[in-house]
Amino acid sequence: MTIDPGRSATVRSVEPGGARDEDLLRRLVAGDEQAFRELFRRYASAAHALAFRLVRQAQVAEEIVQEAFLSVWRNPDRYDGARGSVRSWLMGTVHHRAVDAVRREQAQRRRAEQASGIGPGVVEDPVDDLLAAIDLPRERKLVRAALGALPEEQRDVIQRMYFEGLSQSQIAERTGLPLGTVKSRTLLAMRRLRANLGEGTR
Amino acid sequence: MIRDHALIDELLAAQALDGLDADGAALLERELAAHGDCEECRRLEIEHAEVAGMLALALDPRPVREAMADRILAERRTAAAPIERLDARRDARLGWWQAAFGVAAAVALVFAILLATQDGEGQGVPGPAIVAFEGTAPGDLAMSFTPGESGALVWATGLPDPGPGKVYELWMIEDGDPVRGACLAPESGAVAAFLDADPSSADLLAVTVESEECPDAPTTDPVYTAEPGTTQ
């Protein structure tokens, strides 16, 4: 799957006729419940999908989403517009919490495996699932196309790091690649994704 | 002076994906400090964060019950009322006593739970444990948990102010890897917090002073430590 590198895609965090995310956040600071509901409607299901992809447990994923949005509702002034969009802030918060949960779980599982003498199970590779869907909303199509346009070795690093919650050291350990290679592939992948996602990342 | 941003670019890319481990996070912190007020660093951080923020959209959405939004909105209403009442009559002295009372209530709750649990427990089942932290800084810090179960209470009194824009952060060190536990923001030196994890799986518990964003890896040396095995 490729994407025309000259194409400049535009995906903005606002719906036709809807308020901008940043305006909703401003209303949220004033305690506007409708603004919260609108943000929740826009992002909760994507946040839930992200949390579930990482933790693979429905209840834990729900708790992560609830905690993240509760934090937004209680402390909307923590959002700093100079440091990026509302979407990246929200998704970053959810990802951060989910990765914490994954790493706690990994550490506990590692101990259990060491104690029982059983090695780690086979890790499924869901990247193909991400790339195979059809009839998707435009944003999802765009992001999947950008992921699909990555060289396989770069996509693999993004997959393991972002969608499985592994650190660079853990990826190096599991793949047998030098840590420096994992780091450079991460950076190259992020640069290429940015180029392919274009204006949507603003 | 023109600075090279190659290393910071690489570190920020991994940070945006939550892929840095402790060494990388500490290195990034040092690099950012060395760059000072750096516009290019901010630009790179935003760029990587925006790319990472979009990746989540690749997934098929997973519906969330609307009741969750109602629960969240209800949380604030019930939590906000007493705080507003207290704020109206708060002064520095009263603030200390409120904080101390909160900790005392948490301690009383812990002991009540301990007594209740011990009364009803069967033989051979590990009961609740309390572990006290030791440190280079003054103050008393302790944690109560039941080994093998998720959930722990952390409380403290007499902690020094971590400094402007700083908080204490609790880590569970497991096989040499720090796993984030909780962010602790003391009020007049007092803290009472709940940790949603099983600390008994850690080799060491450590508390460091971190920025109020609560980084996902420690960037300073511990000021308090405790071994979960050495319970009271």
Image (cartoon, coloured by chain):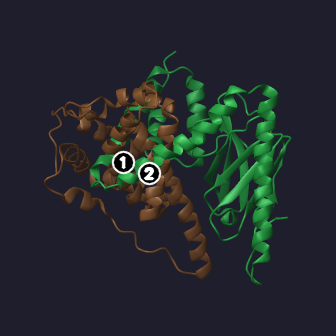
Toward the viewer: B188 or B100? B100
Mark 2 secondary-structure assignment: helix
Is residue B75 at all visible to an observer of this figure?
yes
Is residue A11 toward the left or the right of residue A134 in the image? right
Residue drawn where x is 73% and y is 43% of the image: B221
Q: Give the number of marks.
A: 2
Q: What colour denotes chain B? A: green
On screen, B89 above or below A64?
A: above
Residue tagged 1:
A44
Disc 1: which chain? A
Chain in brown in the render: A
Q: Which residue lies furthest to the bottom in this view?
A: B123
Check disc 1 and give the amino acid type: Ala
Location of mark 2 (residue) = A65
Residue B113 location, quadrant = bottom right
Which quadrant of the figure contains the C terminus of chain B? Answer: bottom right
